[in-house]
Amino acid sequence: MTPDDLKKLLQEIREGKVSVAQGVRCLRDLPYEDLGFAHIDHHRSLRQGNPEVIFCEGKTEARILKIMERMLAKGHDVLATRVSKTVYRKIKRLNGKARYHEDSRVIVIQQKKKRLRGRVLVLSAGTSDIPVAEEAAVTAEALGSRVETLYDVGVSGIHRLFDRKEKILKARVLIVVAGMEGALASVVGGLVDKPVIAVPTSIGYGASFGGIAALLGMLNSCAAGVAVVNIDNGFGAGSMAHRINLLGEGPGTEKIA
């Protein structure tokens, strides 16, 4: 239930279009619905502006489908991350609106049309970083941000980045995704006066330690305004970028889905 849904329900109760008993039935699963194996946080849209996101890795197909079925029944949009193709095919049978983003392994089901806001720019250092970058991009867009991407502009050919400087400067928030030593985040941070969210990836040779080298490089950036999320956490970066982006839309919009 979104803030708009709740306002509509309360208005209809006040006008006598919906009885108090009917209103109670509509609200009985707030703040959560107990499925035995999961407690779905239907209240999250009211608190945070967007519904709970399903992290599918480690969950059985049956549990993923049950959670999704209940969220759809409540009118939520659905964002599911780390989804296999096998699970996607079953979700597609559950709801024909399901869109699968293969690079990022993200599924989006949108039941409500969103007005896209602001401009989030997602950059990747190399093509191997694209899956994580796409997870960030799809997440931010599904939540309601206007998203653009700029891939394969890492420091080994820095002229590729500088050639797109105009696009970089127009963004309200930037997400920089890089493996290896993670240097691209510092370079971008030194070019812009906007928030930069750095995402280290696990891409690299042995001494990269599965992304730890990039993580430490980004945490030690000398560029101001660079924040860092966990290794390969495109979802976390996309979610944070969207929240920052909403702040530029004016008072109160940070709570609107």
Image (tube, grey):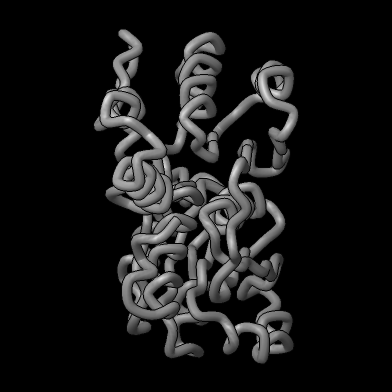
Residue sitting nearer the eye, 116 or 225: 116
In the displayed structure image, the side of residue 9 where residue 131 appears, left or right: right
Rendered location of residue 38, percent (x, y): 33, 17
User: Does residue 122 appear in this view?
Assistant: no
Q: Is residue 147 above or below residue 235?
A: below
2 relative to 213, above or below: above
* Picture layout, residue 19 above or below residue 164: above
Question: Residue 214 location in percent, x, y?
Answer: 44, 59
Q: Residue at x 73, y 88 (%)?
A: 163
In this rendering, would 43 be left or right of 81?
Answer: left
The spot of residue 192 in percent (x, y) is 48, 88
**Residue at 74% across, 28% down:** 96
Viewer-proximal residue among 42 and 85:
42
Please indicate, yes or no, whether residue 43 appears anywhere in the rendered image: yes
- Position of the N terminus, as image quadrant, is top left
Residue 174, given in percent of the width and then of the height, sits at 51, 73
Q: Image quadrant for the C terminus?
A: bottom left
Q: Residue at x 50, y 89 (%)?
A: 191
Q: Quadrant of residue 220?
A: bottom left
Q: Using the image, determine if residue 160 lies above or below residue 206.
A: below
Residue at left 41%, top 52%? 4
Outermost residue on the front side: it is 16
